[in-house]
Image: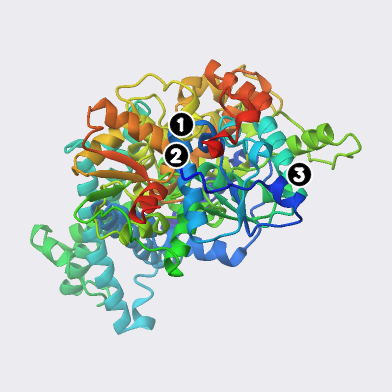
């Protein structure tokens, strides 16, 4: 009974803390400006099912795709077991699903075990790719101490969780063989059977191991759940809404700014009466609150895999720009602004901004807008949209573009071409 | 150029009370850049050859605003766009073929939101259509048999708009040996000119992007590097020159290849 109460308290606390952090994240995402992504719900659902659920964009890198599939399927499916653990924990039962599910239960437990082994394999391979093989994709200026630790912490937690799960099953199996009273005959254990020889023979020791692993597994899952909001691993949740709200327009289409349309229309036609545009603000983005909520959702979705940066033509030729850094900086700044609100209230100014305090001018001007990054992202994150907003601020609010671009603007304005040619000569090619 | 080809302007056509089937939007590079002008004339030769009733805007054409938009100057972009839309709508233009993927992308995707709705195709798509309809073949001109050709995907045609097959169609009918670079189609590597980079010096780095790209192309030992964008043309040609390979390796637009194959 005491244990059931403790379990209830831990479960409730874990869920409460997680909800609190999720609310904070939703609040932070809503710091962004409005943008309408409510159109075409069917197409959005299909995109989500294909890209997030079906992992369709992972296959471009087959090795990573297979390893990731092991961990992904393993984690989703094994979490069905968590449901049973929670019920058992709350009501003091043991393997409550065994009786109603009958033979199916054995199949389920067996498949969980196989998946657990595959998860372990995948996670160890991932760890090796990062720390032993040292793939270039996982390095870079933005991959400082915390992002690298974060990645390894996730992998290590998963090793612990899967190991506890398998040892729990192994001890349970041995207790079943011993005919221990509480341990009903249930489950099929194709993987954990291999652990039997290293387990002790005494019933009390086995019960201690089984109980320790049971508690470790479920408390570990709750702890992991609450680690997610602070980690890049939050992508396991965000991948779904983020792909649902994907940009469905052609990648080459940049948004037309309604606030600018009004002014331009008024300039071209003095009789034009401007349509009301929601909240002026500034042109482009200087800080996270100038971006859209979708840009900010993108930042929380990024799991720092570096596919974007590895295909970025600017980055691969040694320029400072890294699309992954754009996303990580956006998230870091958003979290900072969020913390400021918590500590100092809504209107606190800390004198910092996304542009300059985090992302430099040199980075934003190195982009060729080629869309390689957006194409490479397995969860449809759009770093380019943020870069363009920062450029817009730089050009339209500060008139701070590289000198040669200012010349280009001047030429378009005066000659209708980006070069210094007279518009009268535009059709000269046809006269030769 | 064959002086017998007269390139009609919209103004001339309107004066005669005629409307063309399609407007050829030349673009700034195609109008002023010497290398691109040659491609522009070749596109006209193809239009003339198949007897399409077309016209150009001539001096009434102006920059679409693409480089301004990519560089963050939305004001200038919309000024250009709205002025162009007035001109296009004034002539009641319905269908446009462009000689540049950047113009293509901008008019097709970004003008509708500002009130300019047209059917827009890139010249590679026109060539593809003409081949599919049997109006354009590869006969009567230079033979490309045995020539090794690789195609460089312009970002604003490929990834930006998903047009990968149209330009390849023009090459497939040549009986040449087509080889793909490892980074092709949706994995294609930018030439380095997009996003208004064409009009500025690159940021500090270890290498220029066009060198990275042409390195990859030259590794295939091609006779021809084909593309279908005037900016890619400049960047790739400069890259080939950088390796002193301009004698062995030609950088050609698919319109030029089509004209050569048909002896136009």
Q: Nearer the viewer, residue A177 or B140?
A: B140
Residue A332 in the image: above or below residue B219: above
- Residue A337 image-quadrant placement: top right
| SS class, disc 1 | helix
Q: Which residue is mark 2?
A: B38
Q: Which residue is mark 3?
A: B86
Residue at the farthest front position: B4
Q: Chain of mark 1?
A: B
Q: Residue at the location (56% across, 61% down)?
A: A44
The reply to whether residue B44 is in sight is yes
Of labels 1 and 3, earlier in sequence is: 1
Q: Report if the CB atoms under discs 2 and 1 are less than 8 Å apart.
A: yes
Question: In the image, A423: left or right of B3?
Answer: right
Horizontal and vertical percent for residue A414?
Answer: 68, 24
Question: In the image, A89: left or right of A240?
Answer: left
Of labels 3 and 2, earlier in sequence is: 2
């Amino acid at each position: 009974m005491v244990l059931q109460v403790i379990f209830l308290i831990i479960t409730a606390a874990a869920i409460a803390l997680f909800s609190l952090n999720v609310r904070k994240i939703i609040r932070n995402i809503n710091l962004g400006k409005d943008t309408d992504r409510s159109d075409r719900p069917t197409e959005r659902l299909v995109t989500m099912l294909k890209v997030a659920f079906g992992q369709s964009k992972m296959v471009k890198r087959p090795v990573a795709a297979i390893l990731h599939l092991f961990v992904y399927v393993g984690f989703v499916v094994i979490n069905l077991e968590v449901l049973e653990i929670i019920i058992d924990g709350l009501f003091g039962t043991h393997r409550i699903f065994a009786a109603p599910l009958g033979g199916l239960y054995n199949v389920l437990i067996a498949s969980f075990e196989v998946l657990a082994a595959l998860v372990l394999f995948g996670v160890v391979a991932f760890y090796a790719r990062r720390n032993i093989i040292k793939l270039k994709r996982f390095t870079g200026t933005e991959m400082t101490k915390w992002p690298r630790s974060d990645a390894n912490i996730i992998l290590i937690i998963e090793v612990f969780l899967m190991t506890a799960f398998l040892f729990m099953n192994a001890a349970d199996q041995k207790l079943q063989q011993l005919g221990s009273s509480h341990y009903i005959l249930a489950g099929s254990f194709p993987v954990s059977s291999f652990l039997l020889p290293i387990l002790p023979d005494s019933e009390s020791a086995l019960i201690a191991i089984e109980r320790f692993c049971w508690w470790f597994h479920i408390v570990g899952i709750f702890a992991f759940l609450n680690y997610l909001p602070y980690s890049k691993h939050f992508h396991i949740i965000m991948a779904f809404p983020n792909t649902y709200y994907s940009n469905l327009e052609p990648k080459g289409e940049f948004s037309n700014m309604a606030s600018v349309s009004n002014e331009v229309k008024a300039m071209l036609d003095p009789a034009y009466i401007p349509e009301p545009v929601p909240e002026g603000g500034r042109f482009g983005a200087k800080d996270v609150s100038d971006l859209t909520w979708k840009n900010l959702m993108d930042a929380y979705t990024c799991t720092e895999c570096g596919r974007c940066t590895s295909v970025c033509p600017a980055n691969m030729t040694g320029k400072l720009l890294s699309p992954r850094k754009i996303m990580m900086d956006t998230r870091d700044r958003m979290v900072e602004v969020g913390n400021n609100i918590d500590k100092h209230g809504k209107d606190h100014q800390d004198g910092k901004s996304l542009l300059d305090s985090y992302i430099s001018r040199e980075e934003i001007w190195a982009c060729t807008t080629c869309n390689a990054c957006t194409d490479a992202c397995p969860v449809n994150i759009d770093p380019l949209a943020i870069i363009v907003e920062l450029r817009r601020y730089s050009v339209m609010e500060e008139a701070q573009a590289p000198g040669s671009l200012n010349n280009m603007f001047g030429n378009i304005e005066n000659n209708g071409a980006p070069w210094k040619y007279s518009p009268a000569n535009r059709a000269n090619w046809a006269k030769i | 150029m064959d002086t017998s080809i007269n390139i009609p302007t919209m103004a001339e056509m309107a004066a005669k009370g005629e409307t063309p089937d399609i407007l050829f939007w030349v673009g700034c590079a195609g109008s002023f850049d010497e290398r691109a002008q040659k491609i522009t004339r070749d596109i006209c030769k193809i239009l003339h050859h198949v007897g399409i009733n077309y016209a150009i805007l001539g001096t009434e054409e102006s920059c679409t605003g693409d480089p301004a938009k990519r560089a963050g100057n939305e004001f200038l972009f919309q000024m250009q766009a709205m002025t162009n839309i007035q001109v296009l709508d004034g002539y009641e233009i319905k269908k446009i073929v462009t000689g540049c993927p950047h113009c293509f992308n901008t008019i097709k995707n970004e003008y509708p939101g500002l009130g300019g709705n047209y059917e827009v195709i890139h010249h590679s798509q026109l060539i593809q259509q003409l081949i599919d309809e049997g109006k354009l073949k590869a006969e009567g001109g230079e033979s490309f048999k045995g020539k090794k050709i690789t195609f460089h995907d312009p970002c604003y045609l490929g990834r930006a708009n998903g047009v990968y097959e149209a330009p390849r169609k023009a090459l497939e009918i040549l009986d040449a040996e087509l080889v793909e670079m490892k980074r092709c189609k949706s994995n294609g590597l930018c030439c380095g000119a997009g996003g208004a980079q064409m009009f500025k010096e690159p940021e500090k780095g270890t290498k220029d992007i066009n060198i990275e790209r042409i390195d990859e192309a030259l590794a295939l030992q091609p006779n021809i590097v084909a593309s279908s964008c005037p900016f890619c043309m400049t960047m790739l040609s400069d890259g080939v020159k950088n390796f002193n390979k301009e004698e062995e390796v030609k950088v050609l637009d698919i319109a030029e290849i089509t004209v050569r194959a048909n002896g136009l």
